[in-house]
Image (spheres, coloured by chain):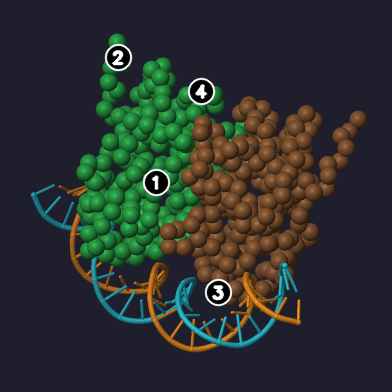
Chain colours: A green, B brown, C orange, D cyan
Amino acid sequence: MADPPPPPFVAAALDRLVALAPLDQDDRRILLGALVRGRQVRPRRDLVVEGRPVAGSMVLIDGWAARVRLLADGRRQFLAFLLPGDLIGVHRQRAPVASATIVTLTHATVATVPHAPADSALGHLYAVDGALAEAYLLAQITRLGRLSAQERISDLLLEFHERLVPTGLVRRGSFDVPLTQEMIADALGLTSVHVNRMLQQARRDGDVLWERGRVTLPDPAALATKLGRNPPRVTAAGC
Amino acid sequence: MADPPPPPFVAAALDRLVALAPLDQDDRRILLGALVRGRQVRPRRDLVVEGRPVAGSMVLIDGWAARVRLLADGRRQFLAFLLPGDLIGVHRQRAPVASATIVTLTHATVATVPHAPADSALGHLYAVDGALAEAYLLAQITRLGRLSAQERISDLLLEFHERLVPTGLVRRGSFDVPLTQEMIADALGLTSVHVNRMLQQARRDGDVLWERGRVTLPDPAALATKLGRNPPRVTAAGC
DNA sequence: CGGAAATTTGAGACGAATCAATAGCTGTGG
DNA sequence: CCACAGCTATTGATTCGTCTCAAATTTCCG
């Protein structure tokens, strides 16, 4: 009667996706069929290159990636981080050209996802993912424009927490963050030296623990209140 | 044979829109029919409110608006500026909720635009507008994260120039910018005092002239080269 | 013309960058 | 299993860019 349980390595991505929009059995089967055909990608590989035509849509199943922009003089800006279950290269316009490079930050698994008409359930899921991704871009702008270094770091970690919860990768406020302090710096418009100092202060304040790639937020809700942060909502229904 | 020329006050918006994607006579007529039904809006009026359901899609025909986010303690961040011909409130997901407030900065004219299927020419135009808007969000992130105050200002003015050219509102490097220095500051993560000082320096450097609401870039191409700036492209075809 | 808003100027304080050096960690090959 | 190379994290001293506060001036608008 019921479908067999999905292989464990796709669970995080699948859980995140189905939380975005309701899917019937057929759609879930289509999605799962795509997910189990993932391919491995090494760290630091470009999944999409700025200025080049976008081949098709993908989903990040495992590992982290980032949208990044490089300036002529070597400065680097991470525009957004991609976590398991995030979609890559979904576009509506014809002959789409990538507006930013997407690079894997860790060993990653990605799979191609099928094109879906806008009025289908899967199409709606893509739309919600796109709207959420945009909402996080807006959050990133606010972080960079109007938050202090201290606030930027806490806010970003809260975002990771918030986005990882639907994947099931958070255990009592703890989750893996496979980023160096330099990557955090390049996302937050800071230097790695300053990120290091601010992280130490956050630890002293009891807001954040970060040991060997694993972050713990002892009280995410309290931290969110302290920052005045509230999660983005993009539809009147769930999510 | 040919259609009558559009009323002059819609020309800027119409020109910008038709430059985004090819439209046949019927589509142009539909678009024009929407544009001539514009309504006037006073400055500082909310067109869309963050967290509230989005009614329908609109186009900004005349005047400027901005996507803005307000922090609990009064800090303000402009996320993006909306110029004549820019679309407002186009969403793909069902029951969309606004991810940011949109407020008029000047006296403005807006019109409702019809919903269009994703595979229609008008739908493609909406898609290209959406992709371009996202590309400008990415540009904003890079500005805030990795450019100096000086560079941010020049880069933003270059963006205005670039976006206004298709509207025909630029005459020999000159165009109206109905923004106060404080608004520029709230967009660029600076204070109005510092914006003032940096603008004076840009004037001394001969890069920018700004008098009584009108900006002149004596040599936009040279300034773009100096900053290493290149305009976003979102489709393999035009634009 | 008058009042409010916007711009301009100055002095000083503060946050974050820079430069530089050390220590820790990770993986690799001998 | 150890030694080494190359990142990554940490610390300190100093500089620089931008903010803050405050006041004067100019511009805009009714």
**Which amino acid, mark 4?**
Ser
Identify the residue under disc 4: A120
**Which amino acid, mark 3?**
Val
**Which amino acid, mark 2?**
Ala
Q: How far apart are marks 2 and 1 (CA)?
A: 34 Å
Q: How far apart are marks 2 and 3 (CA)?
A: 65 Å
Image coords of residue B82 (percent x, y)? 63, 51
Identify the residue under disc 3: B193
Labels 4, 1: one chain:
yes
Labels 2, 3: one chain:
no
Identify the subunit bearing mark 2: A
Identify the subunit bearing mark 1: A
Q: What element carries label 2?
A: loop
In primary-sequence order, the first of circles 2 and 4 is 2
Identify the residue under disc 1: A231
Q: Is mark 4 on a helix, strand or loop?
A: loop
Query: Which label sits on residue A2?
Result: 2
